[in-house]
Amino acid sequence: MRCTATLLAIAWLAAPLVARQQVFTSRVDSVRLDVLVTNNNQPVLGLTAADFEIRDNGVLQQVDLVSFEKVPLNVVLALDMSGSLRADALEHVRDASRTLLDGLRPGDRSGLITFSHEVLRRVAPSENQHRIRAIVDTAQPDGQTALIDASRAAIVNAASTSERGLVVIFSDGLDTTSWLTPEMVVETAKRSEVVTYAVRVGVVDDGFLGDLTDATGGRLLQLRSTEALRATFVKILEEFRHRYLVSFTPRGVAADGWHRLQVRVKQRGAVVRTRAGYSRS
Amino acid sequence: MTRLQTCPLLLAILIASLTAGTRAEQTLEGKVLFNAWLTAVTRHTPGTADDAAATVARWTKDQLLLVLNHPDLDASGVFRRAALLHFDIALRGDARATGALYPSYPRTGPGPPPQPLMVVDGAGLGRGYSAAHLEFARELIKKLDAESKAGFGVQWYAAVAAQLSARGDFADLWYHLQHAEIAVPESAELLLAAGCLRELFAGPMAQATRRRSTMVVVGDRGQNLRRAEDFFSRALAKAPDFVEARLRRGRVFAEQNRHAEAVLDLQRARELTSDREQSYYIRLFLGREEELLGRHDEARRHYEAAAALFPRAQSPWLAIGRLLAHRGDFAGARQVLDRGLRTMQGEPYSEDPWWIYDFGPGRYAQAMLDKVYELARREAS
């Protein structure tokens, strides 16, 4: 009888603890953000943890760490090789890709996806650029455009727990044949730490690349022709290197579900670009 | 009669004598051409690019019109074989007579006909290059009696529609199906072809082109989905076990967010078919429905079943990878992509029927055409 009463008492005391919603308690649960800070379109350098303010679902957080240019990159190029790509544009794409690879540093990894109606997983991310360069120099355009499927494949390939993931997508058309929907891929992007930049040439965006890049804190750059592609790729890499890697351990917020993030810096006039939030389950 | 009165009369006699000579020449030319045409029709083996087809393929539009308007044509009775000859010429793609035979053909309503021309990824889809010979063939089908129209005529229209679908010749297909509505009785196959074309117009390929081109008459996504649903429903009213119409209507319901109806149609289609491609589509579409309902385990089972049917198809693997990424398992998603995506061109062509879904009945084009050839041979013997 006494034993039963004790057990019941323990169960009664424990019940609120079990019923209370689980919250973050461990360093393993820290969130990492790639943040670009600009002022008058120029990157703002030299910021520290004290300069950043992060709110997670409206709750102010303690910024644990801010680093700059120290973490190697994991860059995945996703290149449109559909039938609409003309010979001169193809040369520009090759030249721009080679230039971007030239801008990587020791320790950085790079991978390649090309797509027509089929997404080809050409080169998995590695420090060896030989294979990417060889494929970039020889790939030929043909077929339709699975831009949405390719974008997701690129994000999955770029997602890494150690390096900073950057996807650079190039396309001269709109998607015509993907199985996945734009919403599905944007949803995937929100759950990764990868930053996506996209360059679209010749056709006005139908919303997909804009939504995708916004969700990850990257940018969509719209060009009239591929002549400016090389300079654009260089600009993307430079801009990415000027981003801060900011981490915090969420406190005072529910562990599961979607977390809306608001990130600002204390400097007046500064514009902050980062991903819209993160998801945990 | 005064000189003033005789001059116009003399002029008229002079003109008549000159043109009579020309008319005689034309009559002779027409007769020669018509006989040459009859010979070609008789000698041509349907389904082949033989010398008979090559001969007529070299003719101009004017020469074709001379034959079409020849007074002996109606009595010839060779309409079926001739329709096949001209279709075989259209298939060759090298006919000298291109574009429409008649400037404003077909007249299915007031005003000039719309010209659906899509340029997708740099390639024109359907420029009407085979129109002249198809028009010729359709004029011949018009001359069949009611019973033949309901038999051979319907089969011919459906088989040609399937061929045009297979070639992505959507402009000619558009005209062809509009003409079918007035030329032959309604059939489940023709309704399927019309529904598939509307389904294509609702899809990203046509809608993307619509944004880029001012030459396209396609309509918006919603309009086309509703029209596709109507065509598929009418096909199913004629043939309730018509699997292709049912699985496509299921997908069209899904695209309109009518998921309960979609699942019913897809499950019914699944019960009715053992065709590998149809089963693949059904599994993909059911997987998508389960995914939208949040039943990811069920979704994965359908996607894996699709992958088992076509192991080299990438769409099921992309779908499974997305399920994993959705729960944050990017490592698992990467492994799935490694399994499902090829690394280079030049490996055996990876078969993903999803890539040819938009080509509708084109998948059965050859079988339908063979049926028509066989019908023509039986009726000739």
Image (cartoon, rainbow, N blue to C red):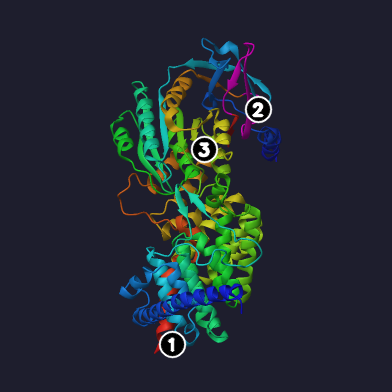
Q: Quadrant of residue B107?
A: bottom right
Where the C terminus of chain B falls, by quadrant?
A: bottom left
Disc 2 versus disc 1: distance between alpha carbons? Answer: 79 Å
Disc 3 versus disc 2: distance between alpha carbons? Answer: 19 Å
Residue B292 is covered by the magenta coloring:
no
Disc 2 marks a residue whose amino acid type is Val
Report which residue position mark 2 lands on. Answer: A253
Tell me the SS state at disc 1: helix
Picture residue at 36% right of the left edge, 25% below the top: A99
The chain letter under disc 1 is: B
Q: Is residue B272 visible?
A: yes
Where the N terminus of chain B falls, by quadrant?
A: bottom right
Tell me the SS state at disc 3: loop
Tell me the SS state at disc 2: loop
Report which residue position mark 1 lands on. Answer: B379
Picture residue at 53% right of the left edge, 41% below the top: A185
Residue A258 is covered by the magenta coloring:
yes
